[in-house]
Amino acid sequence: MSFDLVLFGGTGDLAWRKLLPALFQAFRHGTLPEGGRIISVARDDLTDEQYRSRIQSRFDNVELAKRPTPQEFSRFAALLHHLRMDLSQPQDYVRLADMLKARNADSLVMYVATAPSLFTTVCEQIAAVGLNGPATRVVLEKPLGHDLPSNRAINAALRHVLQEDQVFRIDHYLGKPSVQNLFAMRFGNALFEPLWRRETIANIQITIAEELGVETRGAFYDQTGALRDMVQNHALQLLCAIGMEPPINASANAIRDEKLKVLQSLKPWSPDTIGQHVIRGQYAAGTSQGHAVAGYLQENGVDPASTTETFVALRTEISNWRWAGVPFFIRTGKRLASRNAHIVVNFRPVPHPIFKTPAGAANRLVINLQPKDGLELHLLAQGAAQHQTEPALAPVHLNLDFDQRFGTERVGAYERLLLDVIASRLNLFVRSDEQEEAWRWVEPILAHWRTDPHGPRPYAAGSWGPSAASAMIARDGFCWSEEV
Ligand code: NAP
């Protein structure tokens, strides 16, 4: 199958840090279909050779195991091309159309890795030059809008020029191997599904913690905040993967229908529940990795009086028969104690304990997403101490280390998602109605914060966020996973 993959924004941060390394890995693994072209588009006037050598020097920053040898790079580089275009200028799309139509590849992927303000223009203009035929797939990065009306406007503009199944809204968390393994574990094994319900599960916690601050993206982040940047998309998609009903088959629409139902079942907000169950925070000066670091308000590009949240913790419920009453806790933030993303499924304790167990001990399934991915099943077993008069149990872990089991065959999130786009597999991409429903659910929180005089709670950089987040979960009688 021949393909042309156009990287709008081929000289930008996303392209060189994520997309090109992922495409190289696919090339190295032999999974990138042969006979393809990767065409970078940006305003820089570069020849193909200049673009290739720029990318080669960027590969020096990639971890050693994923860096190409000079021989590998020269074979990979043969796929790379560059086209100078100003995406705001309709006449520039004619040259792109000429270049692509001359070849007429089986699969035409348009990856829009450029400023969100250009998304609609790019889609309209590729249609204006006749590049929106059935072989075309358009990949859109987040953020797709900054609220429900702006998201709807983008989706409406897309619908004018493309079919829904030509639009690939990327959420790279869905491409992570452990998220796919969550689907495999739930729907490919008989073991967990009977336990996957309110009778046996006490609570579920989703944590996406970053150690870094806003780095060089202060101005962008100050307009965005943690709720829009992480909760509306990544955290809610993870919640859907955990909470959805078994789909009728593994097709994209069957999976997306079930995710949509989860989003529609999320408990609606009231001003009271937002006050009690949503904690927003903003990092103050503190320590990260042993170094003193500045607070958010001192970061470059950030308004010194900003009330943008860099931390959110919230409690919600999925109102259906399976989950009624089970709290789902979501927590995400910058400048937290460690870089760590995981989902913890806390099972209820046994109904009638006959053994002595450590306080609070119960079964727990941990799905690790970052920094390593894998699954851990926490069980209780008879300890080694022989001298005990009363039988006592100690915690043990069954650790499914995917790296150890599958090693080099493993495929990273962007690699997997890019191959899926080329092959037109939509399973791991987000449909417009899911995205709109997620915006609809976060809107009342955004509206509440606009008029809330209190602003975000400060927390020290390097901590786990404001203490109010621990108090919030403690009201249900639980604690965050690292406090166990
Ligand atoms: P970036 O570093 O600013 O790169 C933007 C790219 O777009 C550059 O190649 C730029 O090249 C090109 N561009 C801008 N205006 C153009 C125009 N009028 N015509 C042609 N090319 C133009 O941005 P980025 O960080 O890569 O982000 C790209 C998109 O991905 C954004 O929507 C961002 O929100 C999203 N995203 C990024 C990341 C990340 O890790 N970076 C993560 C998630 C989502 P020239 O200026 O030379 O034209």
Image (spheres, rainbow, N blue to C red):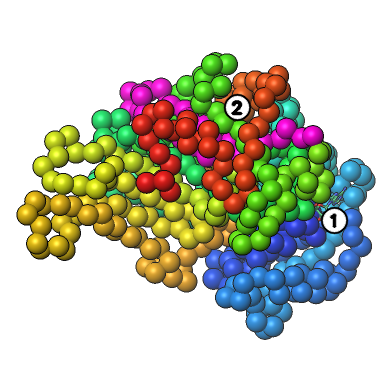
Residue depicted at x 37% and y 46%: 484
Q: Residue furthest left?
A: 389
Crowding at mark 1 (Cα within 10 Å: few <14, some 14-19, many 20+): some
Secondary structure, magenta segment, majority class: loop
Classify 331 as above or below 277: below
| Nearest to the observer: residue 221 or residue 390 | 390
Q: Which of 331 and 75 is in front in this view?
A: 331
Report the amino acid beneath label 1.
Ala
Q: Name the residue under label 1.
A: 42
Q: As shown in the figure, which amino acid type bears the numbered disc 2?
A: Val
Residue farthest toward the bottom in the current orientation of the protein:
71
Magenta stretch in the rendered image: 305-331
Q: In which quarter of the image is residue 293?
A: bottom right
- The reply to whether the magenta stretch includes residue 319 is yes
Q: In this view, does 451 lie above or below 194?
A: above
Q: Looking at the rendered structure, which numbered label has been put on residue 384?
A: none
Q: Which residue is drawn at 43% across and 42% down?
A: 480
Residue receiving disc 2: 442
The span from disc 1 to disc 2 (Cα, nearest Å) is 34 Å
Q: Does the residue labelled 1 lie within 8 Å of ligand 1?
A: yes
Where residue 446 appears, as percent x and y from the top left, is: 66, 25
Indicate the secondary structure of the residue bearing disc 2.
Answer: helix
From the viewer's perspective, tell me whether residue 205 is left or right of residue 364. Answer: right
Q: Where is residue 117 in the image (x, y as percent from the top left)?
A: 81, 39
